[in-house]
Amino acid sequence: MKKALLLAAILEIVAGIVLFLYPSTFYYGGPENVKAIPILKLYGILASCFGLLLMLVSKEAEKSSNLFIKSYLIAMGLNMALGFYTYGMYQAGQIPFIGATITHLSLFLILIIAYFLFRFEKQEIYD
């Protein structure tokens, strides 16, 4: 689970930096929607900060701690919600390609599979 959370952290950081530097590549608002660029840059900053927070949690917190589990579940929920939201934006023609949807939903699937595979590890029964 720590490796999956670290993967999510790295992807959030990289995507946030790219979104901050090149917001027009992810949004197809046209020249009449220039007001959306600062909001996209703000989201890029927030995504990078969230990625840094996830990286700190994955490095410092124990896998069984409440902080780790809750951060992991928040990362799962965020990627699921953003995956569905970006799919709606793609269907409405607001973003030019479906890459953001595929990325978020793929990361959600990786996180949920890792959660169910490694959250309830075998415990020894003592007599």
Image (cartoon, rainbow, N blue to C red):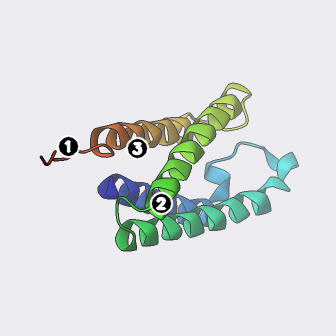
Point out which mark residue 122 bears.
Answer: 1
Q: Amino acid at mark 3?
A: Leu
Point out which mark residue 66 bears.
Answer: 2
Residues 19 and 64: in front is 64
**C-alpha span from label 1 to label 3:** 19 Å
Q: Residue at x 68, y 25 (%)?
A: 91
Quarter of the image for residue 35 reads bottom right
Q: Earlier in the sequence, mark 1 or mark 2?
A: 2
Residues 24 and 48: in front is 48
- Contact check, label 1 and label 3, Cβ < 8 Å: no
Q: Position of residue 114 (x, y in %)?
A: 33, 43
Please indicate, yes or no, whether residue 14 appears anywhere in the rendered image: no
Q: Nearer the viewer, mark 1 or mark 3?
A: 1
The residue positioned farthest toward the front in the image shown:
127
Q: Position of residue 112 (x, y in %)?
A: 41, 38
Q: Amino acid at mark 2?
A: Asn
Q: Position of residue 7 (x, y in %)?
A: 37, 56
Residue annotated with mark 3: 111
Quarter of the image for residue 30 reads top right
**C-alpha span from label 2 to label 3:** 17 Å
